[in-house]
Image (cartoon, helix red, strand yellow):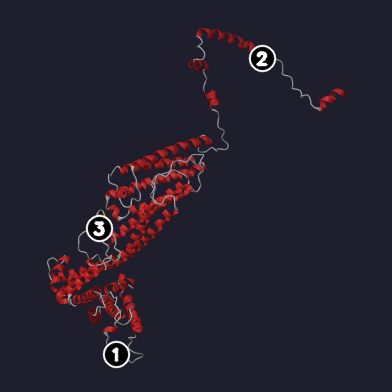
Amino acid sequence: MSGPGKDIVNFKALQLANEQRNAYGLRYNDYVRYRKHCANRTHRLRSTLKMTHGKGREFKRLPPLNTDTIRDGHLQLLLFEAERAWSYSQELLSLSMQPANESRASTLRHSATGRFRRAVNWSTQLLSHCQTLYASSRLSAEGLLQATIYTLIVNGRFLRYRDDFEDALVQLSVARGLLDDLAVAALTSRDQALATLFSDEISPEIRYSAHELGRAKAYDVDGIVAEIAPKHRNDIVEGCDALLGKLQSEGSAVKGESRKKLAELTWDGQPIPVRNPELVDVLLKVQDAEAKLDGQSQGNSGEMKPKGSGSKKGVAAYDAVLHTLSDAEEVARKLVEAQQLSGTTSGSSAPGNRDIQFLHAYIVYKLLSRRIQRDLLLVSALLSSQNSDNYGLHLASPTKSKQEPVDSRLYPAIVKLLDTALQSLNQMRTLSVVDDSPDLSSAVEARLTFTKARRCSYLARCYSPLRKYAEALTLIQHANIYIRETLATLSLSNNDPISLGQPAFFPLNTEAVHELENELAADGLQFKRDWFAYNGGSADADGKSYKKPLFFNIALNYAELDMDRLLERAGKQPAVPVSRAEPTIEKIEKKLPVKSAIEEVRPATPEPQAPARGGLSSLLGGWWGRS
């Protein structure tokens, strides 16, 4: 709070009201909680400002406020009194509509009207003090304009509640016109979103009032505001044109200062409006984190490497982006839930306008894309740590030779990272923004099957050291099926939104797919060779009990070897004529029975004798003789 005297009062009614409403119950239409919060806040402010009405039962009337002693706390007190009365009136109106309170519904509505009238009175006092401060140059034009808009909204809602639709339409239309001017002159994206938020809140009430008055185009809120606001602006708001001029001059005076502007969000070439100040805050943090990440990647891009490869800083740079995107997703999800619970929609009347649900899906898509990019970068970093060739964020590394040692933890870690990437791709495929775009849906599907093929490849390499070659070859077959699906999906569309997008978190082309296919073929051939060398390619035999046979012995056992034919084809010996071979055969036949006869009468083989003893025993045997 500012001190007493001629200090500048920094008070913005719309910003303060929006922050308190979202923080204390009105996000979910909990008027009871918000009313109690406003009551506690007014009690604290009165104690701080020494504006209590005495102690005990003795009531002490407060003196009127002096212009020189007004601080921003006094303006906050009037605002919370108005908010307290308004929330109490809405609470009583909701109670009167319940069937259990049907007998006393009229009493509740009468009490609600009194509380509503009291809210109008408090807001009028707030506007009066703001005009006095503005006249003494202690309040900015923006502060006075926000207080004016707040008073017009409360008064217009009260007139609509009293079924005075004509005056309510004028008050609300002027407030909507001032909000549009405030959004145009906003210096920050947050102020612009704040003005847009209140415009969306009162647009349905303008449409309802116009409908009750019998207007033909009651749905055209912008047209109604453009027709009514310029006519009654100067009558309702004192010095409105001069106030708007002062607002423009204040904006041009601080234009040179650094102001945080949110970059325009686009999807399919069309902008995505951000209509909530909370989302602007978190999206600004996302924008700053992405700018730091892009700056770091450009600084490390002296060589043709993926962003941050080979360094832990490159991987850790994604943590800030993922953290801010998670916060943005949480805020957007809460806003979607609040909209679904209240049963309201965006107040914008433009057909096909992108609402908070579309923005939530867009933020989730950004979060998943950055998460996939981080996982693929981790895969690349792990592969580069093993001195393997790095084909980029989406390519597989070549099969390591037998001479090069591989850490047993490498491939399981890569499989786990690819599992998280698959989870993100599956979640991305179910988003509404992906379903509505056929090209993007095909691109996501192609990357899903390609990642499955990579996962099968690395999982097969996990089975190979365990001598489970059957499982490894089965995974290679599955990977080949996924490769064919990827090629078929890529051929369906010539446009790839992911590779052409910014950032291109998962670039993919047919060359990369064919390269992975060749690596799968090489891995499969190596696994077959290792399997045959281990146990001959048997699924049941054990490698320890298996003895590899020599090829020459196998050939002699199962095939008759024609040496004459081999020598003839080798040119080492001329072919023997068939006529010469016949007498040789006859001689052999004649000798065979003689040989068999000799073998029949051959004497028995004598028993082998023990070998002669050598050394000292043989020498002494010559002296004593043989026994």
Where residue 160 sits in the image (x, y, percent)? 19, 75
Name the secondary structure under disc 2: helix
Residue density around tag 3, few if under 14, some if 14–19, many if 20 or more, within 10 Å: few
Residue density around tag 1, few if under 14, some if 14–19, many if 20 or more, within 10 Å: few
Locate residue 297 relative to residue 254 in the image: left or right. right
**Cα gap from disc 3 to disc 1, whole angstroms:** 55 Å
- Residue that label 3 marks: 271
Where residue 42 sits in the image (x, y, percent)? 32, 81
- Residue 151 shows which numbered tag? none
Where residue 361 sits in the image (x, y, percent)? 31, 58
Locate residue 520 relative to residue 171 in the image: left or right. right
- The one of 612 and 571 positioned closer to us in this rendering: 571
Is the residue 168 above or below the residue 536 in the image? Answer: below
Locate residue 509 relative to residue 352 in the image: left or right. right
Tell me whether circle 1 and circle 2 mark residues in contact (CB < 8 Å). no
- The one of 69 and 116 positioned closer to us in this rendering: 69
**Cα gap from disc 2 to disc 3, whole angstroms:** 107 Å
Name the secondary structure under disc 3: strand
Task: Name which residue type carries label 1.
Answer: Arg
Task: Name which residue type carries label 2.
Answer: Glu
Tell me whether circle 2 and circle 3 mark residues in contact (CB < 8 Å). no
**Cα gap from disc 1 to disc 2, whole angstroms:** 147 Å
- Residue that label 2 marks: 599
Quadrant of the drawing holding the C terminus: top right
Quadrant of the drawing holding the N terminus: bottom left
Camera-side mark, 2 or 3: 3
Camera-side mark, 1 or 2: 1
Locate residue 626 relative to residue 555 in the image: left or right. right
Of the residues under marks 1 and 2, which one precedes in the sequence? 1
Q: Give residue 619's quadrant in the image.
A: top right
- Residue 61 shows which numbered tag? 1
